[in-house]
Image (tube, helix red, strand yellow):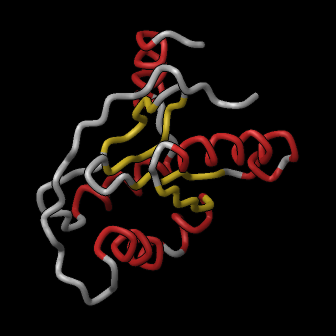
Amino acid sequence: MVSASLRRAAAKNLRANTTPHERALWRALKDMPVAGSHFRRQAPIGPYVVDFVCPAAHLIIELDGGHHNEDEQARRDLIRQRWLEAEGYRVLRFWNSEIATEMPAVLDRIYIELHGGRDAEPAPLKHRRRVWRRTVTPPR
């Protein structure tokens, strides 16, 4: 298992080296009305570092490039997603091409996941700090 300090260092490195698609989505998420909450980027959760997370809504957003089509990477993504879902998170995946060409639709989908519908008023979300259970290890 990778130590917490190594995961934090990896997350910090990823934040310093974001892709253009991650930067575009990050700018859009910062403007999204998420009353009482926020998104974090390149955040360590358990043994993983996720692209974006809204802790209050337990919502994770992952951006995938072309290499996620490869069989081995797709298998690792599925294992990772199942582990995160078992920890109580919902995981949304978007292709980089969707960020580049369909940003309004991506933001609509995120808003719906956060608030339950396109016409729903943003309800205040309350962050519930959760202690990661060290006894759970992801499958290999």
In the rendered image, residue 116, in percent from the top left (x then y), is placed at: 33, 78
Q: Which quadrant would residue 44 be assigned to in this image?
A: top left
Residue 43 as seen in the image, left or right of residue 138: left
Residue under the image location 76 percent in, 28 percent down = 140
Q: Where residue 35 sits: x, y (%)?
A: 13, 63
* Residue 83 left/right relative to 9: right
State left or right for residue 102 relative to residue 117: right
Residue 136 vs residue 49, the one in the foreground: 136
Which residue is rendered at x = 52% and y = 21% of the image?
135
Q: Position of residue 74 (x, y in %)?
A: 78, 48
The answer to whether residue 123 is left or right of residue 67 is left
Q: Position of residue 73 (x, y in %)?
A: 78, 41
Q: Which residue ends up furthest to the front in the rendered image?
A: 135
Q: Which residue corresponds to the image point at 52% horizontal and 56% vertical from the top-left?
A: 91
Q: Is residue 103 above or below residue 5?
A: below
Give me the residue at 63% from left, 52% from top.
Answer: 64
Whether residue 85 is situated above or below residue 45 in the rendered picture: below
